[in-house]
Image (tube, helix red, strand yellow):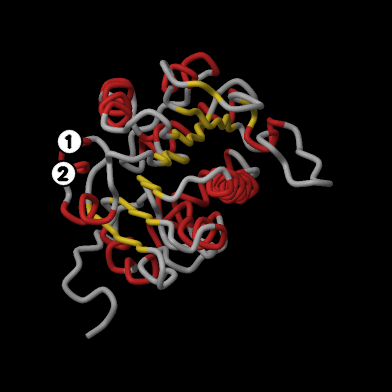
Amino acid sequence: MGLYDGVDLRLNVPHSARMYDYFLGGFTNFAADREAAGRALAAAPWLRAAARVNRAFMQRSTRALAEAGFDQFLDIGTGIPTSPNLHEVAQGVRPDARVVYADNDPIVLSHAQALLTGTPEGRTAYVEADATDPAELLAAPGLRETLDLSRPVVLSLNALLHFVPDSHGAYELVEHLKSALVPGSALVLSHVSPEFAPEDIARLTRIYEAAGTAAQARRLLETARFFDGWNLLDPGLVPIAQWRPAPGEVPGPPSEVSLYAGVAIRP
């Protein structure tokens, strides 16, 4: 049987995860994804760089939290597996780390086995769930069997929430997820902003919406609201390349990526 046998891929409909894979130079994308991604790149040629910078933030933030002692991670909106994946970074620091990936893209489901190969000491799991239904997501058996929610968990929402507009309850779903986590847990988040390249972002929003994907860029204060009640770690909510860059790394101008990022701890 082939990798995609029995999976309804909806190949004629672009999907944000497969477009992101295309921006990263991956091969798990199809004609409709590449066509939509091409229109997006024409509107904002910096999108490829933004995808790489976002991946680098995921790696830096995961490593920093694992080094701080975190050993449980919930990554929602996983996307197409691209090594190093979050569990590879976390388990590279803490071999006993437990990681749950959640996504609702059938392509990600078909590639889930790539996300489940972790260290012998740790554990990884994949659950098919929709971020806009946090109650169902949190009740998923694979999640409950892998993570102990009575202990701190890192909740990763990287490059996800700009696909959940206010009309779809973005703030409510994040609060639902946050409320399920105990004090000492962490929230990791990156989000598109219109503040650095407003014309590009306006065009991109229209392109994604025309492709059937809801989208909403948010300004700094609107993005900061997702962290309400939690304490941001230094350097705060900042242009993504400025979040603890690697030694010797010189962040480019924010207009090249148009993303904010931050990490916060539940008191």
Dot 1 amino acid type: Ala
Q: List the residue tagged with mark 2.
A: 139
Q: Position of residue 68 (x, y in %)?
A: 56, 43
Q: Depth check: 243 or 132 in front?
A: 243
Name the spot of residue 234 as percent of width and height, x first.
Answer: 64, 27
Residue 132 in percent (x, y) is at 24, 35
Residue 5 seen from this side:
yes
Other-residue count near label 2 (Cα within 10 Å), few / some / many at <14 / 14–19 / ≥20: few
Residues at marks 1 and 2 touching, judged by CB atoms closer than 8 Å: yes
Q: Nearest the camera: 204 or 195?
A: 195
Q: Please give the count of numbered marks on the rendered protein.
A: 2
Q: Gap between marks 1 and 2, in whole Å?
A: 6 Å
Q: Residue furthest bottom?
A: 1
Q: Relative to 198, does residue 86 appear above or below in the rendering? A: below
Indicate whether 165 appears above or below 61: above
Q: Which residue is mark 1?
A: 135
Q: Which quarter of the picture shows residue 108?
A: bottom left
Where is the N terminus found, in terms of image quarters?
bottom left
